[in-house]
Image (tube, rainbow, N blue to C red):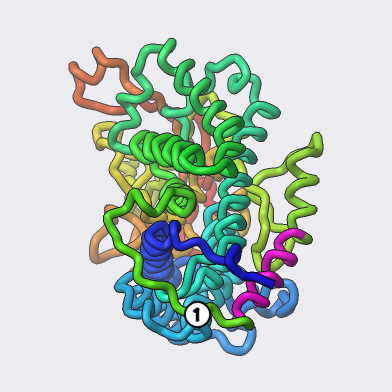
Amino acid sequence: MSWDWFGDQDYWASRLVFQRMLAAIYLLAFLVALNQFRALLGERGLLPVPRFLSRTRLRESPSVFHAHYSDRFFVAVAGTGALVSAVLVSGLADGLPVWAHLLLWAVPWVLYLSIVNVGQVWYSFGWESLLLETGFLAIFLGPAHVEPPVLVLWLLLWLLFRVEFGAGMIKVRGDRCWRDLTCLYYHHETQPMPGPLSWYFHHLPRPLHKVEVAANHVAQLVVPFVLFAPQPAATVAAGVVIVTQGWLVLSGNFAWLNVITITLAVSAVDGGLFPLAPPEPGETPGWYRAVVLALTAAVVVLSYWPIRNLLGRGQIMNYSFNRLHLVNTYGAFGTVTRDRHEVIIEGTDEPAVTPETTWREYELKGKPGDPRRRPPQIAPYHLRLDWQLWFVSLSSRYGARWLPELATKLLTADPRTLKLFRRNPFPGSAPTFVRARLFHYRYTTRRERRETGAWWVREPVGMVIRTCRLADDGTAVPVGYPD
């Protein structure tokens, strides 16, 4: 039997670029974990990992932390993942034997899986599963001295297809505004994390917003099928994906969702378009072929669940059908909110709360707060507290498990928690009372922007955390003072 079909040297450069980009995303993900885990998941975090592990079995959440957890061990795990990712970015692993290369790529996948599976709500985002599924397939792409395996390249296309087509289907089946092309009348204003250009996108002419939505439908419902066509059609389709995802990068902050989708699209590009000359390919080991065939068979079997989900009437989005986050279903913004609300956390150091009390705001790093502050560029970095507070603005039940603990941390001026904020209004001290109010936000008009310099107009509409103080047992308790 001839194995000439197994590899395709025309995708050598595409594979190389894909691997570098994916390794860079891994590196970023591990750095995010190192920067935020103590406050969110550490032994004294908002949702401590040890507490989670005490009620969860290994088969329910596969993770190295079931063997041992401490904050120092978490640093070792995330630090090792970052170090290996940096090695992969540099290309130092390209010359390794096939078996060693596969094992090295397996390290960040195992370590990041371990973090995600204990990350609880802080790691409940679709791009976590997307990174894990992409990273798992990347294990089997092989080093630079063997031809890129065609079957793995096709599996990457199948993943990209599910990402794009799933997102398109959830839209046309969901909110009516996607079908009448009006969703972008609202989305740029109400999206979780607006970026520095989002105000300008929002104020584009409404006919252009309709063109944007129509183009999105073509990009997500038609173009994904062309990815499987022969070249150069597949490269053109990948280019459309890259351009549309780049548009999303400019218009909002969606962590690394858009960047990893672009990375997947790169794997479909004809390698001849990159200014990189492939070497003469070496011999492909027989055991490697067997592993790739087994991987392909496993993905085919696991694809039953996402296919059923895509074809079924009750489509769900961003769902993993197994604890290893393999062959998932994806999608985003099946429903678009029409009004923007923000949770604004405030504190005071006065001894009692009165109607004349002066409240000072805890400003978050990414989400809107001060109406005069321009929305910053955050993506591809991921601010996990900011994102979860967007969900809380939709319904306080999203924060039921951790909002009281957040109030306690602020009342005790916990330094790790305060690092999650851009500004601490009580440097060197702790507030006597804290509360969280819900505000309605809207973008300023062009005229309001010229006259005031503000990006937002806001007004209070309710409470999320009623005024509370620190009790004798060290927890936040509500008080009877007026809000």
**Percent x, y of residue 439:** 45, 32
**Percent x, y of residue 404:** 55, 58
Residue at coordinates 73% horizontally, 41% vertically from top-left? 310
Q: Residue furthest front?
A: 1
**Percent x, y of residue 327:** 67, 58
- The magenta region covers 288-300
* Residue 138 visible in the shown view: yes
Residue 26, quarter of picture: bottom left
**Percent x, y of residue 128:** 54, 59
Residue at coordinates 61% horizontally, 61% vertically from top-left? 151
* Residue 435 visible in the shown view: no
Reply above or below: 449 against 355: above
For label 1, the residue is: 283
In the rendered structure, does residue 291 fall within the stretch colored magenta? Answer: yes
Reply above or below: 254 against 411: above
Q: Around disc 1, counting alpha carbons within 10 Å, would you say few (fewer than 14), some (14 to 19), or many (20 or more)?
A: few
- Label 1 amino acid? Glu
63 relative position to 455: left or right: right
